[in-house]
Structure formats: C-alpha cells, structure tokens
Amino acid sequence: MKKMICALLSLLILSACAQAPAGNAPASDAPASTIASAASEAAAPETVEAPYQMTFYMPLLGSNVIASHAEVKAANIIAEMTNVAIEWIHPPIGQEKETFNIMVASGDFPDAIYYRWTDYPGGATKAIADGFLIPLDPYIDQLANLTALFAEIPEIEKQTKLDDGRIPFMPAAANDLRRRAFDGYLIRQDWLDKLGLQMPETITELHDVLAAFKDQDPNGNGEADEIPLIVDKTANYIRSLASAWGVRDSFQLDPSTKKVAYGPIMPSFKEFLAEMSKWYAEGLIDREFASIDSKMADSKIAGDIGGTIRGNTATFERYMNLMTDSVPGVMWRGIPFPTNGGSPAYAYDENRVRLVWGQGVGVTTGSDNPEAVLRFLDYGYSKEGYDYYGWGVEGESYTKENGEYKLTDIITNDPDKLPTTSAILRYAFGNNGFAKVHNFDFWSATELNNEPSKSANELWFTADNSLLLPLLSLTEEESIEYANIMNEVTTLFDEILFKIVMGVDSVDSYDNFVSIAKQMGIDRAIELQQAAYDRYLAR
Amino acid sequence: MDAIGESGKKLKSIQDQSFFKRIPNDWRRNKGVYLLAMLPMLYYIIFRYTPMFGLVIAFKRFTPGGGIWGSPWAGLANFKMFFGSYYFWRLVSNTFLLSFYNLIWGFPIPIIFALLLNELKSSRFKKAVQTITYMPHFISMVVICGIVLNFVSQNGLITSLLSYLGMPANNLLLDARNFRTVYIASGIWQEMGWSSIIYIAAISGLDQEIYDAATVDGAGRWRKILHVTLPGILPTIVILLILRIGAMMNIGFEKIILLYNPSIYDSADVISSFVYRKGIIQADYSYSTTVGLFNSVINLFLLICANMLSRKVNDTSLW
C-alpha cells in the first residue's frame, strides 16, 4: 500500500512538472490581458456587451523599451473604446518566421495576426485558400474608416485588394511615396573629406572611393584594417548593387521591354557578378561576410573600420549614437544610387513603389468574432486612431496647439537616452507597422529629425523606379507551381552568388547556373509573374 | 517452504490463463511496478508514437485550414518531386558522408579515452580530467557554435594557429572542404568526455580477478588492455555501435544551421537542414515531411542491417 502511494505521488509530481512549462508560456502574456480587460471593464457602463477577448499575434517592437504591447497606451485605449480585450502573443525575437510557420501548422490560430503576408508561401491569396485567413470584404460595412481611406487615396485600394477584388488583410499603408524612400547606402562622409574625395555617383567612382578607403587609412590608426563595404551573411548589401547594371536579384521589370524578367538570368547579371568578384578579390568587400550576422556587422561599424553599408533613414541616428563618443567627427551620409555607363540611377528596393507592402493584420478562421476584431482594427484608419497610434496620448506624449502637434519632453528627452522612435513605444506604435496609415509628416518629424537622414530621403526619393514591380498576387494553383520552381532556383542562386563573389567558382560558372535554372522551370515562373502583373495592371 | 510452493503453483496457474486475464491478476500483485512502467510508456505513446500519424501529410498537400486530416491527398507527388530534385543526390551523399566520417572518427575516440583514463593511477587527477572533459557537453549548442564560429573566423584562434603553421589565414567555414572537419572535430571535443562515461562504467564492472590472473600470467598493461579490458567491454561497444548506425543518417539540424552558410552548401547542406528550411522557413510542410520520412526509412533499414550483421558475427544484438 505504502509503495503504491509513493508511486502515485511521484506520478502526480511528474505530471505537474510536465504541465508547468506549457502553462507558463501563455502566462508570460498574462499582464497583457489583465491590463486590457481592466481597461475595458472601466468602459463597461457604456456597453452592455462584455468585451470580446481576442488574441493578437505580432512581433514585439522595441524589446528594450517595452516587454509587451500591453504597455502601449494607445492600443489599450482603442481596445477599450471598441470593446475588445487583447491578449498579445509575441514570438521570440529573431525567430518570427519560424514561430509563425509552426503556429500555422499547429492549427491553433489567434484572432488576429500582424505579418508580412508576402512571406506566407503563396501570399495572402493562398492564406485565404488554405482556410487560414478570412477575406474581409463581407464585413465591408464595418470597415467605414478603411473605406474612407480607399476613397481618399484610390491607389491604396488598388494595392490592398487582390486580383478578384477581395480584401485579404487590414493593411499597413503609407499616404505618400516619400515615406517609402527609406532604403539606401550610407557612407562615412568624414572619411571622404579626410581623403579629399567626392561623393561617388557612378559605380566606377564608388569602386575608387572604396579602394581609397582600403589603402589610405582613413581611420588613421596606421593599420590597413578598414573594410570599405560591410556586408552580412544575407549578402543583401551586395545584391542590391546589381541595380546599377539594370538588374535585380529577383523578379523585376525589364526597362527596355516593360515585361517581367528574372534578374539573375539576365545577361548583365554576369557583368555585375564579375565586378563584385573583382571587388571581393581586391578586399573592398568584407572577406568573411558569409559568416557574419547583422550584429557583428554593426560592431565592425562601431569599431571605426567600416566605410559603407546599406541601411535606412533610421540608421543614421543609430550609428551616430553608437559612435559619437568613440569616433570624434564621425558623419554618415546617404549615397545616391550609382549609375553605370550612362544608365539611370535605378533603385533596387520594391518597397519604394508600394503604398501597401504586404504587411498588415489578417483575421484568421480561428476567430469567434471577426466583427469585434475588425471594429478594433478599423479604428486605426480614422483620424483619431491615427493620432493615438502615431502620437500617443494627448497631454502625455504630445501636445496640440492650433492644430500643430508637438511631442513632449518625456519622448524627445528620454531619461534613458532612447531615440525618439523608441521612446514613443510606451504610448504609441509611432513609425512602426500596424493596421493604420503611415503618415509622412509624422515620420518626417521623428525619423528624419537629423539632417543626414532628411537629405538622404530626398536624395533616394529621386532615384529611378522602373525596375520595380508592384505587389502582385498569384492564384492558388499558380502559387504552388511557382513555389516549387522558385524554392529550387533561389537556393541555387544564393549558392552561385556567394561562390562567384568569393572567387570559389569562376564567373563563367554563371552560364551553367542559367541553364540549370531553365531546366528547373524559371521561364514558367516568369510567365506566372507576367500574368499576375497583367492582372494587376487591369485592376 | 510451504509458502514458496503455493506461490509457485499460483504463478503457474496465472501463466496458463490468457493474456487479457493475466493482466488484471498481475496488476493486483505488482501495482507499483506497473505504475512506474506507465511513465515511460506514456512518454513513448504521447511523444513518439502519436506524432507518427502526422506522417500522413507526406502523402497530402497540407493546408493550415484543412489540418492533417482535412487536407487533400497528393499521392506520391511529394516523393516524385524530392527524388527528381536537383539537390537529391547532394543531400543524400552529404548526409551519408558526414555521418560516416563522424562514426569513423567520433566512435572510437571515447573508447580510447575511457581506456586511457582507466590506466590513470591518481584518482584525483582522473576526476579532474573527467570533470573538465564533461563540461563542454553541458554548454548549449548555440554557444558552442558561437565559439566555433569565432575560433575559425579570419582572426580566430584556430585560424591564427594554422597560419603560424604556414596555412593561409582564411575563415575556415567559407571553404566547403573544411566543413566536415570543423563539424566533426568540434563534436568530438564537446562529447568525448560524456560519451566515455558508459565505457568507464563498463570497465569498472569488470572482474578484478581476471586482471590479477593476467598479471600472474605475466601480462603487461598493453596486453591487459588488449586481452582483458577490450573483450570485456565489447558487448557494450557493439550495442552502442548498432545504435549509432541506426541513427547514422539522423544528423541534427541545429548544429548544421548554426555553422553553415550558402557558400558551403556543397558539403554542409544535409537532409535535416533541408527539411528545416523547407518546413519551418518556407512552410512547405508536406514536402519537408516527405524528406524526413525518407530519411527515417533509410535509418530503419541501416539499423536492421547492423543488428543482423552483429547477431551473425558475435551473438550480441538489440533483438
């Protein structure tokens, strides 16, 4: 008998242990629901209905500022007004894609998901066909604010809706394309000045500047330790230079024919690879880029050995903060997109032509009350919703005088010395993606608050967009076929790119890549993209 | 005497009963033992057998809305796609070669290490060596790989040492030829001490009298190792070897994806890392299950072969 009790007890203890971790996981988000529900209880007198408990999956913004979006005051206020209570689910930082895919496969869907839906295999069309997202057009009556936005800026409507007119998700949308010109290359202006060099405008000039960085010791420590072009293991900062040759590392428009093409198999791509291989051999590109991550790249920048890097308008402030104390006189500036043999300065980043870029909040089939979820989300497109999500709480994070908005000292002069864009997260989402309008004026006031980033934005906005495709959508059958082809081709392309740039394979092995890509069916994939582009133009 | 006879009779009568009748009887007699056995059984049922039903998606076109049962059937389409894939042979041969070299180098070293430890006279020194060699086993894989990446980077410790010996100072993991060496050597460093425990235990279980007899017969240390210790732990070695071969194609993806980069896919991309990229990154669940299933079938086949071979050669086998 005693034995049995012992055995039973141990069983109980063990099963308790086994359950504990599982029980803990959602518990970490518990503060979210308690705060949110507390807020909505306060509003209870107005609404008879109990607030709808919704789960919301979204990567955490600014983990150094807040532990959960339950701390973002604007979201709580809007949740209270629209009578929902939100339980936030945040994936571990750096594993957003993995966590998302596992969640999708588990069949246990939260109510709402903020995601880059172009990353979902087959895109938003496939997410609806898979029975994962619900199309939102049946609820159009409840989307008064979004409909008003569509009426105000028809381009947003065109880019949000699928080819068949359905609305797949509540989009993050920009009201001005200037807001989208945030990506480009940064260079150490102080190094240029020190060596008496001009800002490079052509690819040849860029090469010569990088070579001078390499040989003439601009950081003045007596060692040739400078890495002229910092690149990380995604090799994105090499890939995007291809636009100087009129090609991209993916699908693009051929500027001469206005047809869809796949950049890596276009003839000028070989010239680009040959040039990059030369740069690498000359030591202009970080020799071990293939094994370093973006953090290590940042530490090379902070160590005063990096001359050029691809970044965005927020990078200026970040690097200045990182380096002002250790490197006196440091100055970063944006480089114009390089031209090459009289070609226009082509831009490489597709985001520049997209007011809606595939990010947004989808409502899943796992939601018991899509109306309530949409009521909450739609509010974000109203003028008040915009003020809340962008500026935060009036009287706390901003003040309004004669219609002019001004951030308060708590935000602009953060006691922990956080940049404005981070400090605002306690009150609002600021410039970060959400189901709302991304207003150029607010962005300009916060992110372009320093001269280098402001002038970089103006400079980058002028680049030529004719290589760039809008956001296309494939049908379900197309997307399966397309994914099968492209999964193989992109793996091979990555390999060949690394190998040729690093000199492991000769530039001539590129021809071999083109013929294998054709065997893999790249021409069919181009056809599918062309068809999708034709449908887009016909929208 | 009487009691023993009675219980013997009882046992016999129980054995005569059918299986389903025996269970409740036996349950009454050995409740505690059953309860204890239940834990590992539950573990295997819940975590090892139940998930096997999910393999069915290898024959389906999995969609999240449909789930495992509701998704449409695809027949053998996924298998055809994998066998026809450009990467099929590379993945299979990379997986095989990496496990093969891992076995060749990684398997004997813990045995040799255990034999060497056994010859140490000072028990304090022995303990110290053991503790130090166990330690890497308890460091998380991410940290280990971080250390490895650092050591073999352009200015890393190992690269610098090699450059003193006249080799070019390049990041070792940017050359496909080095990947297997780095992978296996770091694996040996991490697991050598830990894997030797079982051999040390087996050695300490050997009868001291045999050693004494060997000493009387004039055997030196080397002879004793060769003719007493090794034969004594041979059954342990064989069993572990069979298990190892059964898991031969089963290279975990964690270490691979932490160490590799596209420029060395040529030697570094194995089935498990491919499954990870397909399934978790590209969300092609069915295809990735297909590849995983293929891998498991090969593993099963290897295990059966190794077991049969071992039963023929020296009567030691798993079943």
Image (cartoon, coloured by chain):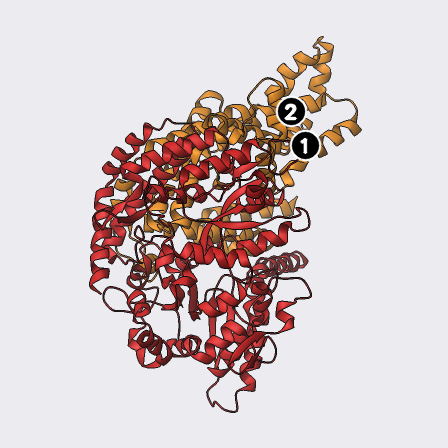
Chain colours: A red, B orange
How many numbered markers are drawn?
2
Query: Where residue A33 sits: x, y (%)?
Result: 55, 73
Residue A271 left/right relative to B170: left
Displayed quadrant of residue A395:
bottom right
Q: Residue at x 72, y 34 (%)?
A: B131
Q: Secondary structure at mark 1?
A: helix
On what subunit does the disc labeled 1 rest?
B
Q: Earlier in the sequence, mark 2 or mark 1?
A: 2
* Residue that mark 2 sits on: B113
Chain hosting mark 2: B
Which of A489 and B270 lies nearest the eye of the viewer? A489
Place residue A416 in its image quadrant. bottom right
Quarter-of-image position of residue A175 = bottom left
Question: Circle 1 is placed at which residue position?
Answer: B133
Q: Give the amino acid type for the residue marked by disc 1 in the picture.
A: Thr
Residue B56 horizontal/vertical position (percent): 33, 50
Q: Quadrant of the N terminus of chain A?
A: bottom right
